[in-house]
Image: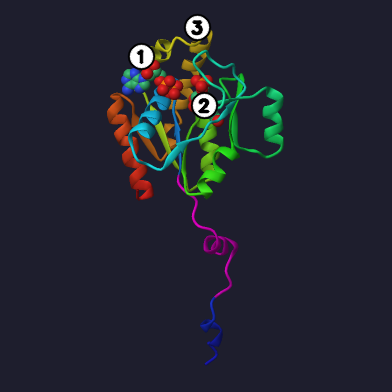
Amino acid sequence: MGSDARETEPPMNGEAFRACHHPPLAPLVVVSGPSGVGKTTVVDRLLAGSKLPLRRAVTATTRHRRANEENGRDYHFWGEGEFRRAIDDGRMLEWAVVFGRDFYGTPRSEVDPHRAEGRGVILVIDVQGAARVREVCPECLSVFVEPPSFEELEARLRGRQDMPEERVLRRLATACEEMARAGEFHHRIVNRDLIDAVCELEHVIRKRFNQ
Ligand code: ADP
Ligand code: 5GP
């Protein structure tokens, strides 16, 4: 008596309504860490050697293309005007000025349609971009890749031989700031032995997304 109202379902809030009418989005993984630590190497090995249903997003940058890079495969190489238009039009999931000079960012078109169609996406981006993605996609998994030592990071960065000394020094200075933010990530992986780092990344992804 007097409790009839309890027999009907409470009205759905917006979040519950969307969850009923849209299938869940496929996983989003964010891999970050200082330049030269081996993020790209670890992620490419993982994607080549595992059956995880993930694709690496091709992100956009205004920096110059290196001799071994291909437009559309390594990055979308955009002019600054093109990049600013994409930001203004709301076409970027995240973007940042990295190393104080170039724009880098993730076009939504590299992420949203794939996740909606059931293909997971992995982003290899800097710590500023990772923080933004955690804000706008709190369901993501974020992983910070650390070097075994600062000396080893320097050796790897120099070993690539793909940039002048002044840029190497800038990247090493930025690395210290980035390492100080490792605690913001869901997981930290030390890339000492490459195979171990790849296995660990695969393990945390499978565990988080039950795959
Ligand atoms: P990032 O994408 O983080 O800038 P890269 O993937 O380009 O770094 O790797 C930087 C350099 O370090 C490359 O020459 C790569 O072959 C090397 N490297 C990556 N992982 C390891 C590792 N575990 N041990 C030794 N060298 C590595
Ligand atoms: P590089 O110039 O060595 O290719 O990349 C420099 C840094 O920019 C790396 O830390 C790389 O992960 C990061 N980066 C690459 N793409 C993006 C992106 O789309 N967004 C952000 N925020 N960082 C990116």
Q: Position of residue 67 (x, y in %)?
A: 52, 13
**In the orientation shown, which residue stands out farthest toward the top?**
165
Task: Kindly state the secondary structure of the residue where label 1 is placed.
Answer: helix
User: 168 or 124: which is nearer to us?
Assistant: 124
Image depth: mark 3 or mark 1 in front: 3
Mark 2 surroundings within 10 Å by alpha-carbon count, few (fewer than 14), some (14 through 19), many (20 or more):
few
Q: Which mark is residue 73?
A: 2
Q: Is residue 48 above or below residue 9?
A: above
Query: Which dot marks residue 134?
Result: none
The amino acid type of the residue labelled 2 equals: Arg
Instruction: For mark 3, give the secondary structure.
Output: helix
Q: For the image shown, how many numbered marks are present on the structure?
A: 3
Q: Which mark is residue 165?
A: 3
Q: Amino acid at mark 3?
A: Glu
- Within 10 angstroms of label 3, few (less than 14), some, or many (20 or more) residues? few
Label 3, label 2: how far apart the Cα atoms are: 26 Å
Dot 1 crowding, Cα within 10 Å, few <14, some 14–19, many 20+? few
Q: Within 8 Å of ligand 2, the CB of disc 3?
A: no
Rendered image coloring scheme: rainbow
